[in-house]
Amino acid sequence: MLSPPRRLLFSIVPDFNLNEMKRALADIEALDFDKAVFSHSGGGDVVGDKTSVIETRDYINDLQAAVIAEFKKGTPFG
C-alpha cells in the first residue's frame, strides 16, 4: 500500500526527519490506546486508532522505498 486512506505527508516533507518520525510513530504504536487524534488532517478525519498509526508509519516506509528505488533507476530529482 502506498497511500493509506485519508493520509498524506506535508508538502514540506524534505524538511522533516523521517527516521525520527517513524521512530516516534513506532513508540506511539507500542502504547495501549484505543483512539488517536491527528493534527493537520486535511480530510477533516482527525480521530483514528492504532491501525491509523500503523498505516501512517507503513506509508512513510513505502514512500521512502519508492523514492529510493526511483533514484537507483536513475530518475532525476525535480
Image (cartoon, helix red, strand yellow):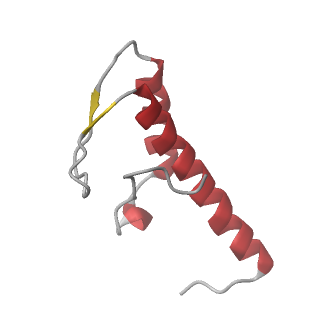
Q: Position of residue 52 (x, y in %)?
A: 42, 36
Give the vertical position of 42 relative to 75 (above or below): above
> Who is closer to the viewer here, 62 or 78?
62
**How many numbered circles are shown?**
0
Res 14 quadrant in image:
bottom left
Q: Position of residue 38 (x, y in %)?
A: 26, 40
On screen, residue 51 above or below 77? above
Image position, residue 55 (x, y; %): 50, 41
Q: Which residue corresponds to the image point at 43% horizontal and 43% vertical from the top-left?
A: 21
Residue at the image position 70 percent from the left and 74 percent from the top: 70
Q: Is 76 in front, or is 66?
A: 66
In this image, 51 relative to 2: left or right? left
At x 43%, y 50%, the residue is 5
Query: Is 75 situated left or right of 62 in this image?
Result: right
| Front one among 68 and 42 | 42
Q: Position of residue 75 (x, y in %)?
A: 70, 83
Nearest the camera: 61 or 37?
Answer: 37
